[in-house]
Amino acid sequence: MVKPRYSRLPARKSSSSTMFLTMLIMFTFLILILLALGILSIPSSNSGNSHKPNDLSSIVHNIVQRSDHGDDDEGRGEHWVEVISWEPRAFIYHNFLSKEECNYLIDLAKPHMEKSTVVDSETGKTKDSRVRTSSGTFLARGRDKIIRNIEKRIADFSFIPVEHGEGLQILHYEVGQKYEPHYDYFMDEFNTKNGGQRIATVLMYLSDVEEGGETVFPAAKGNISAVPWWNELSECGKGGLSVKPKMGDALLFWSMKPDASLDPSSLHGGCPVIRGNKWSSTKWMRVNEYKV
Ligand SMILES: *[C@@H]1O[C@H](CO)[C@@H](O)[C@H](O)[C@H]1NC(C)=O
């Protein structure tokens, strides 16, 4: 015998659907009340900044505050990193070196300064040049405790191991001296045998310069006049994205893009010094370990 199993179903269905409707209406009201009170908000695509990626005015103030590490930071002033450009990728680490470290490097290098040379792109050998009129010298990697400490901090800042770095180069520019725009990467086979291509550079300013002597990136993308120091730049400095030398500051920029191709926007030069003296120190870093 077959029982009329589903005989009562229509009645039950109608009562459960009424309950469902009631709950739906209550839920809708609850959401509306929450929205009205501002407790909930509708996600919108244009909330927050809508800056273009290369709009310098939007990134100049992207500041990362560094916490102090205790004793070894004494006398180095406030530390903070400023993103100045994404093409090329360039960052300023303010007060990277202490005044004592700057003077130490200058004093070490002073007795050994020689007229700077450039690498001949055809032969790979060094040669005298008119495009680079400074004088300079190299300080061996890991030479002493102070230099090892600086090199360790460069590795921390750039995320490139100490072993990938060339020795520190110390440079001196007097009034009128400059370095025409160039790339730090090599175009020849000879110079990449040890360590491979140069991937990034940390340029440290060991002195203030009264006028001129800026590091200029003539091929940088973005609004070059949006930098806060625009009005203090020399004519040469206004020819691109510029960084004004300030004792202790370090400029990190990348010669290679994240996909490991060479970055032509890393073209850079040293503007002629107009007043004062410019001392700087350069650390070039390679893709692989650089044997000394
Ligand atoms: C570049 O930046 C300057 C200073 O912030 C501003 O006056 C100028 O309008 C900007 N130019 C463009 C093309 O965005």
Image (cartoon, helix red, strand yellow):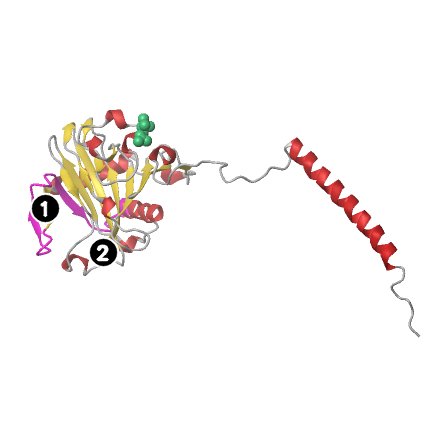
Badge number at residue 146: none
Q: Quadrant of the C terminus?
A: bottom left
On residue 117, the disc is 1
Residue holding disc 2 = 197
- Residue 109's place in the image compared with 193, above or below, is above
Mark 2 Cβ inside 8 Å of ligand 1: no
Q: Tag 2's secondary structure? A: loop
Estimate how packed mark 1 is, as few (under 14), some (14 to 19) or many (20 or more) residues with alpha carbons within 10 Å.
some
Specify the amino acid type for callout 2: Gln
Which residue is at the front of the view, 234 or 20? 20
Q: Residues within 10 Å of mark 2 (few under 14, many from 20)?
A: many
Please state the extent of the stretch shown in magenta in the rendering: 120-147
- Dividing the picture into quarters, in which one does residue 259 lie? bottom left
Residue reaching furthest top?
231
Q: State the residue at coordinates (49%, 37%).
A: 46
**Residue 142 seen:** no
Of residues 267 and 96, the one nearer the viewer is 267
Location of residue 34 in the rendering, given as x and y in whole percent from the top left corner = 68, 35
Horizontally, is 124 left or right of 72 in the view?
left
Residue 96 percent coordinates (x, y): 32, 38
